[in-house]
Image (cartoon, coloured by chain):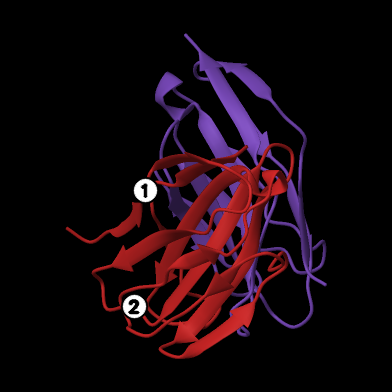
Amino acid sequence: GNSVTQMEGPVTLSEEAFLTINCTYTATGYPSLFWYVQYPGEGLQLLLKATKADDKGSNKGFEATYRKETTSFHLEKGSVQVSDSAVYFCALNTNAGKSTFGDGTTLTVKP
Amino acid sequence: EAQVTQNPRYLITVTGKKLTVTCSQNMNHEYMSWYRQDPGLGLRQIYYSMNVEVTDKGDVPEGYKVSRKEKRNFPLILESPSPNQTSLYFCASSSRGDSNQPQHFGDGTRLSIL
């Protein structure tokens, strides 16, 4: 079956530090890849997506590139803020309607 | 406002007492899905629906039922809840079931089964 593996957390950074959260996947066919963010007490919100190989998704300073050769979709941000503190989920969708999520990575940004 | 609404938000109940968690979306979305979120396990898909009267099992369907009689509603039914179903549940929807559609999530329902 499909699977998504995220780097283990939690991750603690100082404000303005560089962020990388690793995500690798296994899937049959050609999935679409997503990063979602979850703030305390809320549901997940879409952060960015990429639907085919070499696509780069970006939003709010976050970026991730769909790398088919390494089956990866790592999330990066050049300068994090305290307000970026949240749980981040990597996910994939298939055309069959099934969705697979990673375990989530908790990010804490300290002033 | 476009949203996915779940009710109740919190529920404490006892083993064996049937319960239903409702989910409604106002975006005319075809696709809806239920997930449970457990520490260290991320989100796991329980059931999904590609359209009205079309439902299918996700990765952890045991002990759950769903129905999709109307496009906007997708209730999750626990016929005989057990303590291992204590979890945080999320309903989600997307415009279609094809892979490039992101999902919109409700705010979650925290269930405690004693």
Quick check: can you spot residue A20? yes
Is B39 drawn above or below residue A97 in the view shown?
A: above
- Mark 2, secondary structure of its residue: loop
* Closer-to-camera residue (B30/B8): B8
Image quarter (top left, top right, bottom left or bottom right) of the N terminus of chain A: bottom right
> Residue at image x 77%, y 34%?
A8
> Residue at image x 41%, y 72%?
B74
**Circle 2 marks a residue in which chain?**
B
Q: Chain B shown in which color?
A: red
* Farthest-out residue, bottom: B53
> Residue at image x 52%, y 83%?
B98
Pointer 2 residue = B29
Quarter-of-image position of residue A11: top right
Q: Is residue B12 left or right of residue B52?
A: right
Q: Position of residue A73 (x, y in %)?
A: 68, 55
Q: Is residue B52 left or right of residue B26?
A: right
* Closer-to-camera residue (B86/B100): B86
* Farthest-out residue, left: B1
Identity, as a three-letter code, of the amino acid under mark 1: Pro
Say which label, 2 or 1, has the lower sequence index.
1
Assess disc 2: are there few (<14), some (14-19) or many (≥20) residues with their C-alpha within 10 Å of its C-alpha.
some
Q: Which chain is purple?
A: A
> Residue at image x 67%, y 72%?
B58
- What is the number of the mark on residue A61? none
Identity, as a three-letter code, of the amino acid under mark 2: His
Q: Position of residue B15 (x, y in %)?
A: 63, 47
Pointer 1 residue = B8
